[in-house]
Image: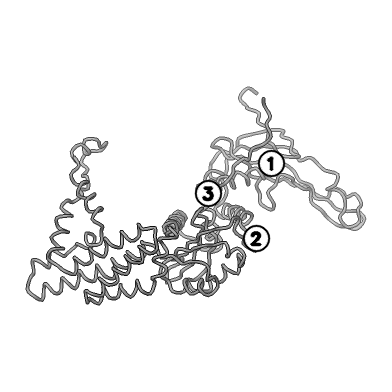
Amino acid sequence: MFNTITIPSGLEGFINTNTTIANTVTDRSIYLIDGKLQEREEDRICPRCGRRMHIHDTYGISLGHIPIGTTFSAVRFEKHRYICPECGATGMQEVPFQAGSRRITVALNSMAKDLLGLGFTNKAVAGITGLGKNTVKEIDKERLLEKYTIDGKQLRRPERQARYLGVDEFLLHKGHEYATIIIDLETGHVLWLAHGKRKKALCDFIDFVGEEWMDGVEAIACDMNSDYQEVFDDRCPHIQVVFDYFHIRKNFNDKVVAAVRKDEQRRLLAEGRTEDAKKLKRTKYILSSNRSTLKEKDEASLKDRDAELEDRIFSGGKVKEVKGGNMDLYESLLKENGLILMTDVVKEKLSHAYTLDDECRMSSEITEIIDICNDTGDKHFMWFARLLENHYEGIIAHATYRISSGKVEGTNNLIKTLRRRAYGYCDDDYFFLKIMDESRREYVRNPKSHKIYD
């Protein structure tokens, strides 16, 4: 009697009579909380004729309960089955603390929801609570449906009016199966997810939120997917599409800088200048970087590495060396190759253009870049000039609407991390709900109650 601690169970209608420690089939200790389920008179009323029913059968039942410390627990009691002597109807004694049809208590169900809402993985919650992984998934999906849908069938409309949106696609499954994502750029909240990356995904979003809600949207950041621009020009012409620096610069690096470097290598080899061609090998990163980035790399290479090795706990390791001389190599490549020099000019002018907050000045800067590209006579530069011309309005709009798709790209990384933590998701609806929940990360555990103590 002196080696026990009495803890109130908090279970409505349950009277604890004894608590023992038992072993499961896997030889794990578990607290068995034995007790009696209080009988309610309304459970005995026949739902068909209204007469008082008799006890027809009694059987034992166990429900998983919240762990006590690191030890799982379960409540054990007897439950009655009733039968009406008049009409023969049967009924079961209600268990007010049972979580629906699951063999767990409401308290354990709420605990699992709290842990899931705080960001614990399904596997971690299963380990903490002792629940099966499929049960944890059911609880999590139930939580998400309550939070983001109406009656588990229709997605709730955005809780606030968004001024700026971001649109992008991400790889959903292997085999080129993509999904479209739309986020509120001010809050980072995911507002819409849909299969595919075509016009229908955006049209469905506009129909979902309604034209009145879309009237409050001022601009949208996206990549140069023509489908996106066409939908907004068609359905919501007042919304300004903005093409940010990241996608413009990525196109320039991938389609111009990389292609020009290869062309120059081939030219030098054809002229028999083997040593000059070798200098261009493994220079894609250097040629694609800004001068400021290269200077930072050179400065990092001058740090004292011996001191860093001394601070290590385990001996024998090597510090990854950051190679210096990036700026010297870059300058020498610019002097020896005219087209590579022009890539540097365009990069610096693009970088400067996206710092401007006046559309007239940015328009003038982009026009100069187009002229420079055309004057080179190189097919890669001329392709980039056409790209700028075709997306001219959306590019210079950045001067007015200082938005980018950076948050969308960050959300794409969040999606990859979420998928990796769970080793993939087979249920797309569940996966989409998880993405929406991860983008918010606002979950109130144990909401504030009335003040008890002075």
Front residue of this view, candidates 357 and 107 = 357
State the SS at label 1.
Answer: strand
Residue picked out by circle 3? 441
Q: Amino acid at mark 2?
A: Gly
Q: Residue furthest left?
A: 272
Distance between the alpha carbons at the discs numbered 3 and 2: 20 Å
Look at the image and name its color scheme.
one colour
Front residue of this view, candidates 155 and 82 = 155
Q: Is residue 453 above or below residue 283?
A: above
Q: Earlier in the sequence, mark 3 or mark 2?
A: 2
Can you tell which of label 3 and label 1 is closer to the viewer? Answer: 3
Which residue is found at the position 90% from the left and 58% from the top?
87
266 left or right, relative to 445: left
- Residue 56: image location, x then y, percent: 83, 50
* Image mark for residue 32: none
Which residue is found at the position 65% from the left and 23% from the top?
1
The quarter holding residue 372 reads bottom left
Looking at the rendered structure, the number of numbered marks drawn on it comes to 3
Residue picked out by circle 2? 152
The quarter holding residue 37 reads top right
Residue picked out by circle 1? 76
59 left or right, relative to 298: right
State the SS at label 3.
Answer: loop
Q: Local crowd at mark 2 within 10 Å, few (<14), some, or many (≥20)?
A: some
- Residue 66: image location, x then y, percent: 61, 40
416 left or right, relative to 134: left
Which residue is found at the position 56% from the left and 37% from the top?
71
Can you tell which of label 2 and label 1 is closer to the viewer? Answer: 2
